[in-house]
Image (cartoon, helix red, strand yellow):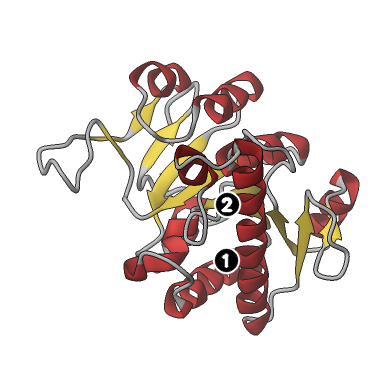
Amino acid sequence: MVMDQPKYKRVVVKLSGEALAGNLGFGINQEILNSIAQQIAEIVALGVEVAIVVGGGNIWRGVAGSAKGMDRATADYMGMLATVINSLALQDALENHNVVTRVQTAIEMRQVAEPYIRRKAIRHLEKGRVVIFAAGTGNPYFSTDTTAALRAAEIEAEVILMAKKVDGVYDADPVVNPEAKKFTDLGYIDVLNKGLGVMDSTAASLCMDNNIPIIVFSINEAGNIKKVIMGENIGTYVGREKND
């Protein structure tokens, strides 16, 4: 069902670092960054309160570093710093679209961002500012998916929008297997039991415990964030009940 008014008032948008890289495979693709900023600006103009969690995989992946013998905690801290780089780039792109933005980081670095303070973040949202949560949870061994679930619970967001390079959740990798079947609706338990790769198990469990729905969709098509906000059934809906 498509609505005249936004279906959601307060959302967390989860962007993967890889999505920012686009076809480059690494680093930040300025065209994609601009497209994402434009899409965020569209929903802010509708009065939607937007928080963003961005990954760092386009610059550094902690898991990859630790697999090559690096201390896991050190590798993860490096990954957190990569998310700060992406967050500052996204802040700049949003402000070029006249969207007032604040970066809050879980690792204190006062020269570039505010420290994460829950009540301050909520106040920013209430004033119509976009808040970007950087540096993960501030702890190693936790992914930015878990950060998105945690922050969504803390700020009482209604939904997590998982903006990815693929247009939903499939039963196999659609790039490798053209016969892969796309799901329209899934339960949290399905995601956990089938290991579908929507988000890691810690994040999925946190969403399930706090009843935070997740919508997985493609960021590559301009206007998709607005479509999801307006209630269009694109991508895959994960929750306790079906997406009406």
Q: Position of residue 102 (x, y in %)?
A: 77, 65
Q: Assign the N terminus to one quadrant of the image.
A: top left
Q: Assign the C terminus to one quadrant of the image.
A: top left
Disc marking residue 181: none
Residue on which the image places disc 1: 40
The reply to whether residue 23 is in sight is yes
Report the number of discs: 2
Residue for point 66% across, 77% down? 92
> Is 120 rendered above or below residue 196?
below
Q: Is 47 on the left or on the right of 18, as rendered?
A: right
10 Å crowding of disc 2: few (<14), some (14-19), many (20+): many
Q: Secondary structure at mark 1?
A: helix
Disc marking residue 13: 2
Q: Position of residue 3 (x, y in %)?
A: 49, 51
- The Cα–Cα distance between marks 1 and 2, rounded to whole angstroms, is 9 Å
Residue for point 62% across, 25% down? 206
Q: Secondary structure at mark 2?
A: strand
Tag 2 or tag 1, which sits nearer the N-term? 2
Residue for point 70% across, 55% down? 134
Q: Position of residue 98 (x, y in %)?
A: 68, 81
Q: Position of residue 199 (x, y in %)?
A: 47, 35
> Is 37 rendered above or below residue 163?
below
Q: In the current view of this chain or complex, which residue is farthest to the bottom?
A: 96
Amino acid under disc 2: Val
Q: In the current view of this chain or complex, which residue is farthest to the front?
A: 69
Residue for point 72% across, 38% down? 139
Amino acid under disc 1: Ile
Q: Is 64 on the left or on the right of 235, as rendered?
A: right
The reply to whether residue 158 is in sight is no
Q: Quadrant of residue 193?
A: top left
Confirm or deny contact between disc 1 and disc 2 (CB under 8 A).
yes
Q: Quadrant of residue 144?
A: top right
